[in-house]
Amino acid sequence: MEKYYVKKVENINEIAVEVPGSKSITNRALLLAALSNQRCLLKGVLFSDDSRAFLDSLQRLGFEVIIKEEEKEVTIQGMGGNIPNRKAYVNVRSAGTAARFLTVMLALAGGEYEMDASAQMCKRPMEPLLSILQGAGVEITYKGEKGHFPFVMKSGKPDMKEVTIDTKISSQFASALLMSGVLMEDGLKVHMEGDRTEGSYIKMTLAMMEQFGISVEREGNSVLVPNNKVFGVEKYQIEPDVSGACYFYAMAPLLKTDVIVKNVHRCSLQGDIKFISLMEDMGCEIDDREEGLWVSGKMLDDYPGLDVSMKDFSDQTMTMAAIAPFASSETVIRNIGHIRFQESDRIHAIVTELERMGVGCEEVPGVDGICIKPVQTEAVKKTETETYEDHRMAMAFTLIGLKTGMITIKNPMCCRKTFENYFEIIDKIANENNICN
């Protein structure tokens, strides 16, 4: 599917959906299970381009991996920090988590690895991690641009007891060091700098380490990870993907409807659950029910624009940018400069595509963010929206099409990175709307 025309949806009573497992939790669980010394059954696994890249990499490294995709299950035999194939070719494709997590694990475990990636991932930053590893004695030979994939990595026993990492560009750097720190004979003390040391993904990493049996000591922005090769769990349930759920929750105020996403709850480990608070700020009703979190925008005549820092749940910047044009006042999204370095330059992508639609949007350097002006629904221009090979652009900007009927999404299947059947669900919503009307 090269293009997807988004049908306008009006007067729909309720949207009830189920979303895949969390990418962030899935790929952390895959790593922790492989590092452990137990046989672990992962349930509720996300199967997408990113998770398949991680699974393929583990198989290439010689891990015993049993995949039951229909049941959304993966069983991994942990090797207690040992890598079965200590000389291997690994292709992380476009998965940032696989790129950062596996690079550190393999460097600290030792061996010789040819590390490859997609053209998109080869553009994303790796230099902070690679410099640290080189400083610890890991030999890295670049096959392209320095500080980026692809490269060949040779490692014996890295000399690293303490490390300082900046979280500004990506908190994945810190998460990678924290999880694989268990491999170091004397443990690893990780000092975190930057503006996301208390970020949601760091908290998720530490919480999952505890769930898998790794007890860390945290003092301020420093975390001591002990040497630990005896840990793990027999079963681990992966939460539904709150990031994916938020596209549907955003439909509540946008389409003035009720939305429930099965098995999503406010106690989630995932930072994007903070998006629900923005729905409350817009006037939606929220109810955490047994079957899942329910959000209602039915009673809204309109909803206000917000002035909000999204530093700690920035994956939802594009979701907010997609519903902001239809608010009653302007929206300011702050502290999101780091999203320039993700799957695309997301700030540039948002501003460019909204302006093409006739929506006023500009960068605001003073707040490290953007400002979006309200627009009348009928003033949105017919647009074929570029997605920049970015799954979140494809999924979030579909919302504007549901509101206006004026949007066609180019290269919609880039959403396979995290949510393979997203547009099947959108089709179902649109078809139900047509039947009801």
Image (cartoon, helix red, strand yellow):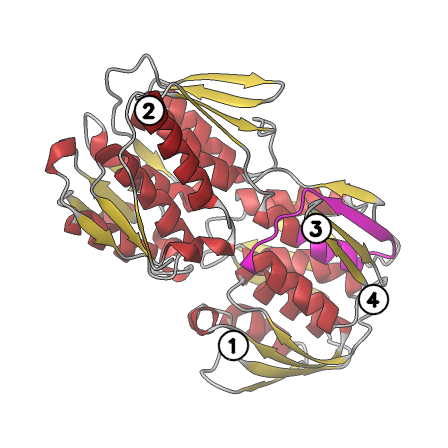
Label 1: how many Cα within 10 Å (few below 14, some 14–19, many 20+):
many
Q: Circle 3 sits on which residue?
A: 29
Q: How far apart, in angstroms, are the residues tagged by discs 4 and 1?
A: 28 Å
Label 2: how many Cα within 10 Å (few below 14, some 14–19, many 20+):
many
Q: Secondary structure at mark 4?
A: loop
In-image side of 433 versus 186 (left or right): left
**Can you say whether 185 is above or below 262 in the image?**
below
For the residues labelled 3 and 1, say whether their Cβ atoms are less than 8 Å apart.
Answer: no
Q: How far apart, in angstroms, are the residues tagged by discs 3 and 1?
A: 24 Å
**Can you say whether 288 is above or below 348 in the image?**
above
Which of marks 1 and 3 precedes in the sequence? 3
Q: How far apart, in angstroms, are the residues tagged by discs 2 and 4?
A: 53 Å
Disc 2 versus disc 3: nearer the observer:
2
Range shown magenta: 28-49
Nearer the observer, 114 or 425: 425
Q: Circle 2 sits on which residue?
A: 253
In-image side of 316 versus 130 (left or right): left
